[in-house]
Image (spheres, rainbow, N blue to C red):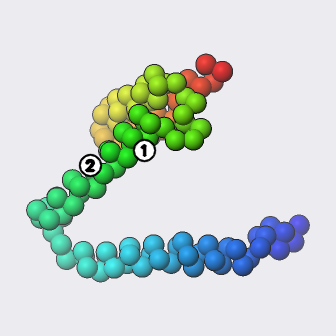
Amino acid sequence: MSAAQLIGDWHALLVLFVAGVIPNQIWRMLGLWFGGGIDEGSELLVWVRAVATAILAGVIAQIVVQPPGALASVPDGLRYGAVGAGLVMFLLTRRSIFAGVVAGEVFMLAGKWWLG
């Protein structure tokens, strides 16, 4: 297998990199540069963190209540159970987001397998 077959159309990868990665990284670097001197306990940063958490919670709630795409085929009880399993694992593992996400995914996959 040649490198061209493995990579495919390198022009598409270059466009993806330029259009997707570089603009994202610019904002990250600017955030590091401007936010480097901000105290993590400052009122501004606490407010920003709260707003970001609220937006994320709203998006997750919308996905669970009105699921898009293939997730719409998963029964409501299974989706809510996966959220509950993830929350319980998150709390049991001293607020480990990774453990909560894995527990929710395992619950969802096991439920889909069980229900067929």
* Residue ID at (59%, 26%): 112
Callout 1: helix, strand or loop?
helix
- Residue toward you, 84 or 2: 84
Q: Position of residue 113 (x, y in %)?
A: 63, 24
Residue at x-position 87% and y-position 71%: 2
Quadrant including the N terminus:
bottom right
Q: Give the x, y percent position of residue 62.
A: 39, 41
Q: Position of residue 43 (x, y in %)?
A: 11, 62
Which mark's residue is nearer the viewer, 2 or 1? 2
Q: Is residue 39 at all visible to an observer of this figure?
A: yes
Identify which residue is drawn at 80% across, 67% down. 6
Q: Which three-letter amino acid code belongs to the residue tagged 2?
A: Ala
In this figure, what is the number of numbered marks?
2
The residue most toward the right is 1
Spatial CA span between label 2 and label 1? 19 Å
Query: Disc 2 marks which residue?
Result: 54
72 vs 100, left or right, is: right
In the drawing, what numbered circle is on residue 98? 1
Position of the C terminus, as image quadrant, is: top right
Residue at image location 55% in from the left, 36% down from the top: 71
Q: Is residue 39 left or right of residue 7?
A: left
